[in-house]
Image (tube, rainbow, N blue to C red):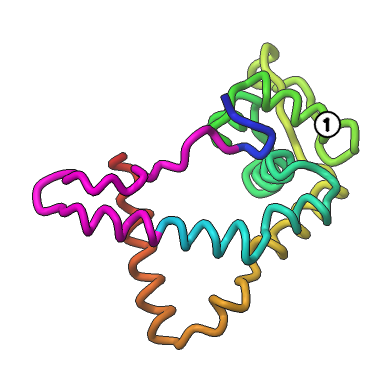
Amino acid sequence: MTGEDGVSGGSGASGGSGTTGGAGETGAGEEAAVRVWRDMRALVLEAADIRGRVTRALGMSFFRAKALRHVAEEGPLTLGALAAALFADAPYTTLAVEHLVRRGLVTREPNPADRRSKLVEVTEAGARAAAEMARITDTPPPALRELAPGDLTALERILAGALRDRSAD
């Protein structure tokens, strides 16, 4: 089940057991991957405190803020499509949307194409809140901005490759 922060249990890292993963992989390579993953998480979640900054600025959980931003950028969406995009179950997403509706940040209306479903659409106030979230989440932390241009280029290339490969998981 997805928690209040929108994160499912487990980090996806193997824990660095040193076991061989596949052809050409070594225990040292797996351990390095675990160290890099921990450092990336620490940079984003701890040093930059993105989640904390968003929740304080918007006065809501990070999951709700993430749902709001997704509706603002991709909406209007059905509740089912929003839940799928957030990798959350439908009842949990419904609770988050109900909170956003009560705060006047989104509307939830019958879907004209399928009256059995509801469409979630951002309001003007919701668009402003989503823009504030984007401002916070899209601002790189000082540690990243201070990297040499060549290092940033290399990191961008590496991350692009890793993100491209995620569909194979």
In the rendered structure, does residue 96 fall within the stretch colored magenta?
Answer: no
Left or right, 110 with respect to 18, comes to right
Question: In the rendered view of the protein, which quadrant contains the N terminus?
Answer: top right
Residue occupying the point 54% across, 33% down: 8
Look at 64% across and 16% down and name the residue there.
114
The magenta segment: 7-36
Which residue occupies the extreme front position in the image? 17
Residue sitting at the far left: 23
Residue 111 appears in which quarter of the rendering? top right
Can you give x and y, in whole percent of width and height, for residue 33 in the image? 32, 57
Q: In the image, what residue occupies the spot 65% across and 70% down? A: 139
Q: Is residue 9 magenta?
A: yes
Q: Is residue 39 left or right of residue 96?
A: left
- Residue 93 image point, x, y percent: 68, 27
Q: Is residue 59 above or below residue 9?
A: below
Horizontally, residue 136 falls left or right of residue 159, namely right
The image shows residue 76 at horizontal and vertical percentages of 68, 37
Mark 1, Cα crowd under 10 Å, few <14 / some 14-19 / many 20+, is some
Of 96 and 8, the residue lying toward us: 8
| Magenta-drawn stretch, dominant element (helix, strand or loop) | loop
Residue 141's place in the image compared with 107, above or below, is below
The residue indicated by pointer 1 is 99
Between 49 and 134, the one nearer to me in the picture: 49
- At 67% from the left and 58% from the top, the residue drawn is 50
Q: Is residue 62 above or below residue 37?
A: above
